[in-house]
Amino acid sequence: MHSYTDKYADTKTAISETCISVSLVRPTEMNFPQARKLMLPEKNSDFDEIQTYEQEDVEQLDIAELFTQFYIDEKELLNHIAEYKKQNPNKQFTLQELTEAYPIQKGLSELVAWYGIANKDDTITIDSTKHDVISYQKDDTLLKVKVPRMIFI
């Protein structure tokens, strides 16, 4: 009688010497749960009634402001800097001081143009730790804007 190890010893050598091949008759079905498409909730579209206006209801002055365009002349703003420097030589000054001497004429667009000039000019620095209040008139209303301090060197 063979022992347990002796009984299977011949089988191990037979398997290692034989080449095993497996072929599938029909394709297997593989399930990848991560490959499923996401299910999105159905959108409920509730549309409110659109309010319409008659031509007479819309004032022409309101529409005119949409189409009014103007040009901010950066050369003119640079001239303001040069003139202020002539009046106050050897002195640093802020945009607030400059706009008090040469008031803003074209509103917020002109104020934005000053910061555009500061981006291009190395003699102008912006200190974002301090702020100034710039005032300008628009339609008989005094508007004040808090902006980072701009220093002209």
Image (cartoon, helix red, strand yellow):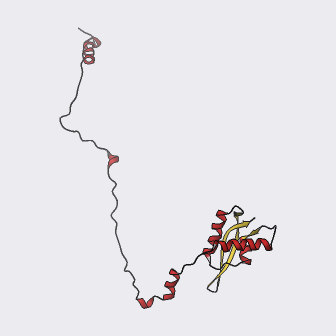
Q: Quick check: 42 left or right of 146?
A: left
Q: Quadrant of the N terminus?
A: top left
Q: Quick check: 151 left or right of 74?
A: right
Residue found at x 25% / y 13% = 10
Residue 57 sits above or below residue 66 on the image: below
Residue 18 sits above or below residue 84 on the image: above
Q: Quadrant of the C terminus?
A: bottom right
Residue found at x 80% / y 72% = 88
Outermost top residue: 1
Residue found at x 31% / y 44% = 32
Outermost right residue: 90
Image coordinates of residue 90 in percent, x first then y, are: 82, 67
Image coordinates of residue 99 in percent, x first then y, are: 71, 75
Indicate the quadrant where residue 105 lies.
bottom right
Residue 125 sits above or below residue 96 on the image: above
Outermost left residue: 25
Viewer-proximal residue among 125 and 15: 125
Residue found at x 49% / y 84% = 63
Indicate the quadrant where residue 38 lies.
bottom left
Q: Quick check: 93 left or right of 119?
A: right
Image coordinates of residue 142 in percent, x first then y, are: 66, 82
Viewer-proximal residue among 20 and 145: 145
Image coordinates of residue 61 in percent, x first then y, are: 51, 87
